[in-house]
Image: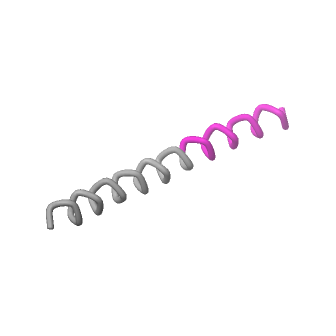
Amino acid sequence: MQLASFMQLETELTQALETYFFNLFLIFVLLTMEYGAN
């Protein structure tokens, strides 16, 4: 039972990290396009 809850927590943490890094990547791309246009 303890292991199952740990696996659930790990899954949620992984998804949160993926979302966080995806947002960072999008911001980086947008900033690069902004500076590239100038």
Q: Is residue 13 magenta?
A: yes
**x, y (%) of residue 33?**
22, 57
Q: Horizontally, is 6 left or right of 36 in the view?
A: right
Q: Horizontally, is 3 left or right of 17 in the view?
A: right
**x, y (%) of residue 19?**
47, 47
> The magenta stretch spans which residues?
1-15
Q: Nearer the viewer, residue 8 or 32?
A: 32
Which residue lies at the image location 56% right of the left edge and 49% below the top edge? 17
Which residue lies at the image location 54% right of the left edge and 42% below the top edge? 15
State the predominant SS element of the stretch in magenta: helix
Which quadrant, please, contains the C terminus?
Answer: bottom left
Relative height, residue 18 to residue 37 (above, below): above
Relative height, residue 14 to residue 31 (above, below): above
Q: Horizontally, is 20 left or right of 26 in the view?
A: right
Q: Nearer the viewer, residue 20 or 36?
A: 36
Relative height, residue 38 to residue 8 (above, below): below
Which residue lies at the image location 49% right of the left edge and 51% below the top edge? 21
Give the color scheme: rainbow, by chain, secondary structure or one colour: one colour
